[in-house]
Image (cartoon, helix red, strand yellow):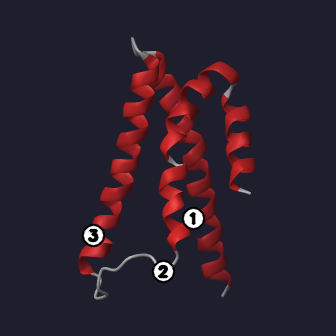
Amino acid sequence: TRFWQAVYIGWALVVGASVTFQLCSTVVLNGRSTSPTFHALYVSNVGVLLGGLLLVPHSAVSREECKRPAKWWSLLGGLCSLPSFIGVPAGAAMGIQLVLLVQLFAML
């Protein structure tokens, strides 16, 4: 129905805007640190931790058994996200727009 389409489009806009907001606020927060490289690492890891904590309630009430992923290559997503902390100092050095554009191209 049109109502649910509008809800889904609104949700996609909010989630998309949150990525930009997160990078902007992290660059500002990182600029106040005495050691920006380590601070960027801490901030990105706290973001990953919060994302994992948001998944806990859903996984705690799930009726399915815990099992390994069906495809081995699905584990590469976690490996590829390890250097994500580099985006914070890069956003401060090169500009947030360029970093977001590179991240979008990388997802393609």
The first of marks 1 and 3 along the sequence is 1
- Of badges 3 and 2, nearer the viewer stands 2
Task: Using the image, determine if residue 13 lies above or below residue 9.
Answer: above
The x and y percentages for residue 48 are: 40, 48
Marks 2 and 1, how far apart in space?
Answer: 29 Å
Q: Residue at x 65, y 68 (%)?
A: 9
Marks 1 and 3, how far apart in space?
Answer: 20 Å
Marks 3 and 2, how far apart in space?
Answer: 23 Å
Q: Amino acid at mark 2?
A: Ala
The x and y percentages for residue 62 are: 29, 82
In this rendered view, identify the residue nearer to me: 58 or 102: 102
Q: Residue at x 38, y 76 (%)?
A: 68
> Disc 1 designates what residue?
11
Q: Residue at x 74, y 57 (%)?
A: 108
In this rendered view, identify the residue nearer to me: 90 or 23: 90
Task: Name the image quarter holding residue 41.
Answer: top left
Residues at marks 1 and 3 touching, judged by CB atoms closer than 8 Å: no
> Disc 3 designates what residue?
57
| Left or right: 39, with 16 as reference point | left
The first of marks 3 and 2 along the sequence is 3
Dot 3 falls on a residue whose secondary structure is helix
> Disc 2 designates what residue?
70
- Badge 2, how many Cα within 10 Å: few under 14, some, many 20+? few
- Badge 3, how many Cα within 10 Å: few under 14, some, many 20+? few
Task: Using the image, determine if residue 39 lies above or below residue 84.
Answer: above
- Of badges 1 and 3, nearer the viewer stands 3
Task: Name the image quarter holding residue 60.
Answer: bottom left
Dot 2 falls on a residue whose secondary structure is loop
- Of badges 2 and 1, nearer the viewer stands 2
**Residue furthest left as drawn:** 60
Q: Amino acid at mark 1?
A: Trp
Residues at marks 2 and 1 touching, judged by CB atoms closer than 8 Å: no
